[in-house]
Amino acid sequence: MSSAKQILIPVAAGFEDMEVVICSDILRRAGCQVVLAGLAPGPVTGGRGLSLLPDQTWENIHETDYDLIILPGGMGGVENLEKHAPLLASLQQRTRRGALIAALCAAPGLLARQQLLDNRHVTAYPGVLDPLSRQYHYENSAVVVDGPLITSRGPGTAMDFALTLVEILLGPEKRQETEIPLQRSTY
């Protein structure tokens, strides 16, 4: 693999279209190598009807080759990701190693159900996580970074989430270099 940061985004039927597109686009603009991995061969359709042809299938990737795995939301997509035992095993291993995992929208719920949020500060789409849980510390924020775990609320926070990932992986200068051409509003 090249020296560029390697990002893995597993995609399953029902994924949140905006989150996959925005995250993969922003990270590619920053110079990262982003691989969309389908759980099975062929196109995958998102919750809003976007059809993607993943770069690889999960069985053809080596998760340890990736600097970051991003779990997109979309209730249907997350339900399908959660049925994929090899992905769940990979998430368990990454958590034990302290490797970077990012999850947004409904995906932090998958991590909670797998007992991977213990004592972490997190956020998610409203209603996905219990704000009073003793398992984790819920924050009502757009993006929450707690060590190797980065969480975000949903489609509306996907750009801030992706830019935060750029900053974590490549530094604040690269974030600014990536963000300025996007002509983001400052109000």
Image (cartoon, helix red, strand yellow):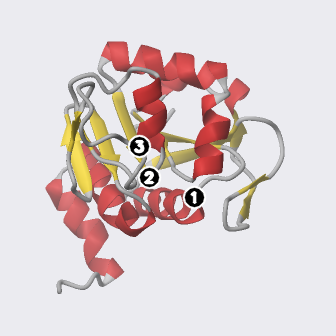
For label 1, the residue is 16
Identify which residue, 96 or 105, lies in the foreground: 105
Badge number at residue 103: 3
In the picture, the disc for residue 50 is: none
> Answer yes or no: do the residues labelled 1 and 2 have beta carbons within 8 Å?
yes
Q: Which residue is mark 2?
A: 105
Dot 2: element: loop
> Which is closer to the viewer, label 3 or label 2?
2
Task: State the CA–CA distance, disc 3 to disc 1.
Answer: 12 Å
Q: Amino acid at mark 3?
A: Ala
Secondary structure type for disc 3:
strand
In this rendering, position of residue 75 left or right of residue 58: left
- Picture coordinates of residue 87 (x, y %)? 59, 25
Q: Residue at x 54, y 63 (%)?
A: 21
Percent coordinates x, y for residue 61 in the rendering: 63, 27
Amino acid found under the numbered disc labelled 2: Cys
**SS at badge 1:** loop
Which residue is pictured at 29% across the width and 47% down the height? 123
